Amino acid sequence: MPEAGLPHHQITQSQNHSSSMIRITDEAKEMFTSTQIAPKSIKLDAGNGNLGVQWADGHLSAFPYQYLRDRCPCATCAGKAPAPHVPSSPFPMFGVSKLKPVRAELVGRYALQVFWSDGHSSGIYAFDHLRELCPCADCAAQQREIESQTEK
Ligand SMILES: [Zn+2]
Ligand SMILES: [Zn+2]
């Protein structure tokens, strides 16, 4: 029974959905070489209400829309911390379809700006921050480790 972690192979299977996909051009890739963490491709609709990011180092991230929005880094959203308890839904992966990114744009060479279906668009996700937000088991474990080290 698949749960919160979307198997990565599902993302690669939907590569035909080019309309909602941002391809990082070779030119842009060169710009990215100065940053350690850069996406190779970004898919707004990677399936199951996820935004998919394939990173230059081969890592794949699937961000549930609501998860991403809850962590919107803009001044307005950052003011109100995400609710510590996400209301439990019997179908957490399928009950988040209301709010979704309608498009996304690269901001310079370091960030992704997401335009949400409710008109909100001031959230600019720096790639290194986005990578930190990766909800996959590996990254989550890594984040927990970092957090436990910084907590006093
Ligand atoms: Zn925001
Ligand atoms: Zn990850």
Image (spheres, rainbow, N blue to C red):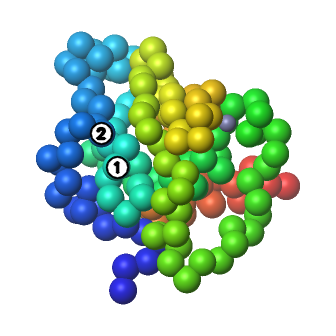
Mark 1: few/some/many CA within 10 Å (<14, 14-19, 20+): many
- Left or right position of 11 against 149: left
23, above or below 138, in the image: above
Q: Between 123 and 148, which is closer to the camera in this rendering?
A: 123
Quarter of image, res 142 = bottom right
State ligand 1's quadrant.
top right
Residue 90 shows in the view: yes
**Picture coordinates of residue 13, whole percent (x, y):** 17, 57
User: Quick check: marks 1 and 2 in contact, CB under 8 Å?
Assistant: yes
Residue at point 85%, 55% (across, down): 152
Q: Residue furthest bottom?
A: 1
Residue at point 77%, 34% (across, down): 76
Quarter of image, res 48 = bottom left
**Picture coordinates of residue 119, whole percent (x, y):** 59, 34
Q: Which mark is residue 45?
A: 1
Residue at point 27%, 26% (across, down): 24
Instruction: Please tell me whether mark 2 sits on a helix, a strand or a loop.
Output: helix
- Left or right position of 69 against 85: left
- Left or right position of 3 against 80: left
Q: Which residue is mark 2?
A: 20
- Whole-angstrom CA distance, mark 1 to mark 2, is 6 Å
**Picture coordinates of residue 17, whole percent (x, y):** 20, 45
Mark 2: few/some/many CA within 10 Å (<14, 14-19, 20+): some
Please state which amino acid type lies under the numbered disc 2: Ser
Please state which amino acid type lies under the numbered disc 1: Asp
Q: Which mark is residue 15?
A: none
**Picture coordinates of residue 104, whole percent (x, y):** 43, 31
107, above or below 135, in the image: above
Residue at point 47%, 69% (across, down): 93
Sequence-first tag of 1 and 2? 2
